[in-house]
Image (spheres, rainbow, N blue to C red):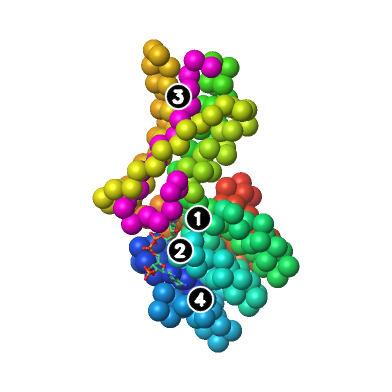
Amino acid sequence: MTPMLRLALLGYGKMGKTIARLAPERGCEVRLTLDVDSNPGGEGITRENLRDVDVCIDFTTPAAVVENIRRVAALGRNLVVGTTGWNDKLDEVRRLVESSGIGMVYAANFSIGVQLFYRLARAMAESLAPFPMYEPYITEAHHRFKQDAPSGTAIELKKQIEPALKDREVPLASIRAGYIPGTHELGFDSEADTVILRHTARSRQGFAEGALYAAKWVMGKKGLYTFSEALERS
Ligand SMILES: NC(=O)c1ccc[n+]([C@@H]2O[C@H](COP(=O)([O-])OP(=O)(O)OC[C@H]3O[C@@H](n4cnc5c(N)ncnc54)[C@H](OP(=O)(O)O)[C@@H]3O)[C@@H](O)[C@H]2O)c1
């Protein structure tokens, strides 16, 4: 029998709780959960606390995540990072991961459906690029508790279609309201009609599935990977 993967959950908010619920069904055991009270400034990430932990999963806040990565890397544990809003620190995080010899998977969106959505978005942009009467745009909507805007997924979506669209402008609009789990839309609008590709998350379960998948995948790996790279190499 494959031994259970032993996890530490950094952040025990909406995502941390969803992962904790799903973990036992996916062959994982949550050994440690750290929240803002038990982990101020990353202080809960100690050798003693991570003693029985194989992989850490971080779903915290943009303000907390980089210090958490630094401490986990210093203790030589692999990790999965779902927290968004730290794109500007990617170079620093890459250096931390490479110099410590750990493995890390990160993504603004751990839903496998969204990874396929990116693929379709690239194909859509390539098909419509030769027709400049179709103007591209992106919209995204999330619950009012989400701290960053635009979403990391929308930023990644824009990056995915940019090579096909060259220097064309892609306006991006964000909505924060109510309890929307997450909707992303890529549209091409012309005077005559509109072409739309939309992904709608129904719940957080899809993100939790992907994060647990990535936690198993990253065991024994070294280096920094996006979730889409992890899926391609699976
Ligand atoms: N990649 C994906 O697929 C995906 C999917 C969903 C969400 N996300 C992202 O993941 C992050 C968390 O999302 P969520 O919906 O779970 O948010 P959430 O419910 O607000 O949970 C975040 C939790 O982290 C806690 N926290 C803050 N500082 C901490 C620290 N130093 N150590 C441990 N915990 C700390 C917060 O506590 P307080 O509230 O008390 O500050 C909060 O409970 C966000 O950046 C969100 O955009 C990513």
Q: Earlier in the sequence, mark 1 or mark 3?
A: 1
**Label 1: which residue?**
85
Please give the name of the residue rendered at 56% of the width and 66% of the height, measured from the top-left corner: 66
**Mark 4 to mark 1 CA distance (whole Å):** 17 Å
Q: Earlier in the sequence, mark 2 or mark 1?
A: 2
Q: Nearer the viewer, residue 10 or 113?
A: 10
Label 1 environment density (alpha carbons within 10 Å; few <14, some 14–19, many ≥20): some
Looking at the image, the residue that sits furthest to the top is 192
In this rendering, would 58 be left or right of 205?
right
Q: CA distance from mark 1 to mark 3?
A: 27 Å
Q: Position of residue 171 (x, y in %)?
A: 47, 33
- Residue depicted at 48% across the width and 46% down the height: 153
Disc 2 target residue:
61
Q: Is residue 59 left or right of residue 95?
A: left
In front: mark 1 or mark 3? 1
- Characterize the local packing of mark 4: few (<14), some (14-19) or many (20 or more) Cα atoms within 10 angstroms: some
Q: Which mark is residue 188?
A: 3
Q: Position of residue 109 (x, y in %)?
A: 48, 50
Residue under pointer 4: 41
Question: Main structural element of the magenta stretch: helix, strand or loop?
Answer: loop
The residue type indicated by label 1 comes to Gly
